[in-house]
Image: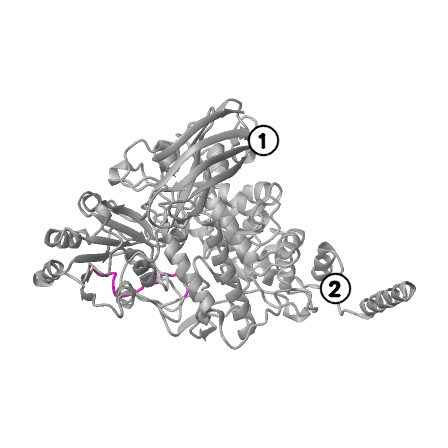
Amino acid sequence: MRDLSRILAVLVSLFVTSALLAQTYEYPFQNPELSDDERIDNLLSLMTLEEKIATFSGLGVPRLGVADPGSSEAIHGLVRGGATDLENFVRVSQIDRTRDYTQQQTAPLVHSTAFPQGYGLGETWDKEILRMVGEVMAVEARYHSWKTGRNCLVLWAPNADLARDPRWGRTEESFGEDPFLVARLAVEEIKGMQGDDPKYWQTATVMKHFLANSNEDGRTYTSSDFDEALFRDYYSYGFWKGVVDGGSRSLMTAYNKYNGIPCSTDDFIQEILIEEWGMDGQILNDGSALTLLVTAHKWAADKKEAVAISVNAGITRILDRFADEMLAAVQEGLLSEEIVDRNTRFNIRTMLRLGLMDSSDANPYKDMGFGDVAPWETEDHKAKARLAAQKSVVLLKNDGGLLPLDKKEVKKIAVLGNRAEEVLKDWYGALPTYEVSVLDGLKKAVEGTDVEIRFQKWDSDGQAQELARWADVPIVCVGNHPTTSPDWQWDKIQAPWGDGNVAGDGREAVDRRSLELETEDLIKVVWQANPNTVVALISSFPYAIDWTQENVPAIVHMTQCSQELGNALADVVFGDYNPAGRTTQTWVKDILDLPNMLDYDIRNGRTYMYFQGEPLYPFGHGLSYTSFEYSGLKLRRAGESVKVSFDLENVGARDGEEVVQVYVKAPGDDALMRLRGFDRIAVPAGKKVKVEMDIPFDDLRLWNMDAHAFILNQGTYDFNIGASSADIRLNDSVKL
């Protein structure tokens, strides 16, 4: 019997082997049994120069059966097409983008799941949430690709830029001001988007914008200037970790210069990104960046020279019209075909990892078993959108325990303000199939009760005050508009660039001129009529709301764009969800607390690491409906890491989550301290848990400009553990 089993096993093996040998491919690059380099070499050898150039615009090789990978924005939800506010919009055909903008097509309305803006996702301080968001966007991208036959598999996310200044117009896209936090969250989102298959990617990620892109005014020509230490320890840190820890292999360069050199032409592309970090995917310049090398930076005489400079530097994808100029650059000797081949390999490798070179079913993401129901229509994705929004809520203040509201005691609620009636969208967000406004969410939450809700947008003829006096609790919903104007207009495919009409608002191409909340006067009027006022600040960035903080008893913060915004806020207001979000920036009290906008040396008073004043809200701040106590800190060296352990006890009456934060002051470090560990931990009411965290030496190293390397400084390391950068509960030191 045993011999028979062996014979059968041999026969099966021979059958499988013969089947594999019998399988033939038209081209060797289609054979998944070959190495990646062999497949890339073969495809490259079959391509014409024009086909190689076409990959620089994100195209595949249709003649050889390699489909276009396609691309999409995906900062906080898949954006399949561009403008989210229009039911129909004019968009340039992907094929025609290599040549001219004269041939256009109308794209249909496209939906996907809408999460909080990147700033709000950062405020979750939750690595699992970021991975979940990445997975949702990737699944929906695969669904769109499968359903429409038009791929969108290269996703322009996450944003690894640092929100070093609250005036930056694109603060909404960033996870925050701290490189360690941004890096950890970016890594998880990347893993969620790319998947866990060892060979194939679910989608490819493109981190943006490298490097030091955090001013909008003058971004096309200004220079972000700082030394090598800040390059390594701060500005490039999130990108570096996204590559080496997250597995991302692509990024988009920024418009600005770095120390006088345009980022899309800098030697760091080849020397650091490719050779040191091992990037071998697409390296993009941003839209119009090629033209700006000529017009704004004065770096090239014409677009032909700009193409040659960029491609020689390592750029593999260009978002301008460029094909004719690139061909001419090769023909005239400004750009060698060898360099074109070198960069084309990066584009092909992305196609390979997306499974676009395979005719087989080896790619697990090729057929994901999609049915008739779109993923964003499923209860699963709706629930995940709600969870992400809940996790993003930051309780900034709650004097006297005004929140949560008890529906048995609070019978009359006044909802006021211009952010109560709608969920606003931005240029880089998804278009959901439904949206729940604050007003809708609150009304839904009190259905079946005797709680009455009334709404007043503005204080017309004292109506807001009258309504506030009527209410047991007024809730004032105010904040920015993410496009800076409610009446902005789309000009065909163009985003609405130009000045904003509200000084405190910002967006792409527009920095904020003020930190003041334009509608804070409404808060004052309502509070004067009823001191039991709750403020729901729904904004893409911090405000200097000094008066509100001093006077109003309860303040919560959320960002724009989540389709579940209203439900999540209602969950928190009525105590169905205990908030645990945390600030990811230092909220200053006054614009005078900030250095010059173009001063990129953060040592001059930026971020919690160097800010010497008293903030309005410190980095890492956020309250809960329960209380936590820390005790029993122990530090010990174990191999190449420091083991941190302590007890965390929920001493309140509600289950809750605490975001524990580990800050370290290293010997020889000029920063006040640096975040080196964090975790969002659920603790039932009355229970105590043991928190154990591993802080690797690699996370404690700082860049040494003499050695040009990350060095673990010798000496005493002070460990500070607490609920924010200003709320330290435990501290101890260890010598390394």
- Residue 688 at x, y percent in the picture: 43, 42
- Start and end of the magenta stretch? 417-430
Magenta portion: prevailing SS class: loop
The answer for how far apart the CA atoms under marks 2 and 1 are is 46 Å
- Residue 654 at x, y percent in the picture: 34, 50
Q: Which residue is mark 2?
A: 31
Please name the amino acid that badge 1 sits on. Answer: Ala
Residue 77 shown left or right of residue 548 in the figure: right
The residue sitting at 54% across, 74% down in the picture is 147
In this view, the residue farthest toward the top is 715
In this view, the residue farthest toward the right is 3
- Asked whether residue 422 is drawn in magenta, I would say yes
Taking depth in this image into account, of 609 and 378 the one nearest to the observer is 378
Taking depth in this image into account, of 618 and 168 the one nearest to the observer is 618
Residue 179 is marked as none
Residue 638 is marked as 1
Precedes in sequence: disc 2 or disc 1:
2
Please name the amino acid that badge 2 sits on. Answer: Asn
Pointer 2: residues within 10 angstroms few (<14), some, or many (20+)? some
Taking depth in this image into account, of 677 and 731 the one nearest to the observer is 731
Taking depth in this image into account, of 387 and 462 the one nearest to the observer is 387
